[in-house]
Image (spheres, rainbow, N blue to C red):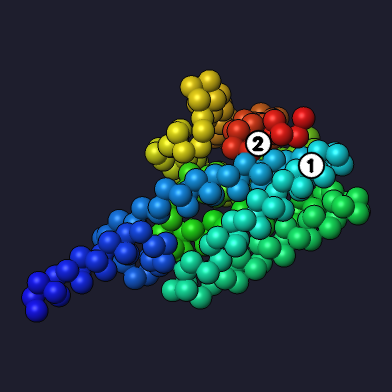
Amino acid sequence: MRRRLFFLSVLAALLLAVLVIAPSAAQPAAAAAPMPPTYLLADMVTLDRAYIAALAVTSLEKLEPSQKSMAILVPTWAAFQAKYIGSNPADPQWRPDFDAVNDMIGRADEIVRANSGLVAAHDELEDVRITLMGLRERNGLTYYVDHLTRFHEPMEAIVLAAKGKTPQTLSAADLDVIQSHLPAARSIWADVTAAPFDAALFGFAPEKQAAMQKQLSAESAALSQLQAALDAGDTPAIIQRAVALKPAFSVLFMLFGDFDVLS
């Protein structure tokens, strides 16, 4: 009887390590999150390659690339959804999140097909990454791109507060937005630069890894320069450095998309 109980306990542990159904709330406080199966991470990477390309080109309001990107994203998402929507019954929000993402992508596709405002399609797609990040975090799944998604919110708030402003039009409220969001942005960025990165999983050859490192360094410098401008009370530099947070991050994020198929 003891041997049988031991065998069953080992089998249960192995199944727990393989299945992606382990909410973080069920883990002891000091336990590390279980590593998700490699095939799930690989499928997430494939989905993001299609998704990030569509997110980027719809923001540029280019119709033909947007149509091409959605023609790739829609079936890529459909395959991912069919494979994983029923894989985690332990999380009651798992299926609703999949349904929500499916609706977002469906609405974006309809907008692109009708050419009825590509920015609206982009806005629909923006929430996809937020929803999937929440799904992964809730279930203890560590995924590198989520670090970039977390950084995007405070970074974007800073950029929008300074964009189009002059030293005369930058208000006290604008300055407060920049000052209040910068600590969070720097803290999250520290996580970005410290997080392990699996170049093989993401298909980053040495040349692409070098490009990634270049943008990581550029963003780190931009954050430090903005902090220095704030410390000095240099309003023109604050505006310039705040807006300068966007370019390096955008290039970095787009490295995870597949744009070659759109040319």
Q: Which residue is mark 1?
A: 68
Q: Is 90 displayed left or right of 241 in the figure? A: left
Label drawn at residue 258:
2
Answer with left or right where residue 48 lies relative to residue 40: right
**Would residue 77 be visible to someone looking at this image?**
yes
Do the CB atoms of the residues marked 2 and 1 lie less than 8 Å apart? no
Q: Secondary structure at mark 2?
A: loop
Give the residue at x 54% y 44%. Answer: 45
The amino acid pointed to by label 1 is Lys
Say which of 35 and 183 sits in front: 35
Is residue 109 or residue 8 the one in the foreground?
8
Q: Position of residue 69 (x, y in %)?
A: 75, 43
Among the two numbered marks 2 and 1 on one chain, the one whose residue lies closer to the N terminus: 1
Residue at coordinates 61% horizontally, 65% vertically from top-left? Answer: 98
In the picture as drawn, the residue positioned furthest to the left comes out as: 2
Identify the residue at image location x=39%, y=62%: 19
* Vertical side of 211 occupied by 65: above or below: below
Query: Which amino acid type corresponds to the residue marked 2 in the rendered image?
Result: Asp
Q: Residue at x 53, y 62 (%)?
A: 84
User: Which of the pair 61/243 is nearer the observer?
Assistant: 61
Occupied quadrant, residue 198 = top left
Regarding residue 179, the answer to whether it shows in the image is: no
Lateral position of residue 226 relative to residue 110, left or right: left
- Quadrant, the C terminus: top right
Quadrant of the snapshot with the N terminus: bottom left
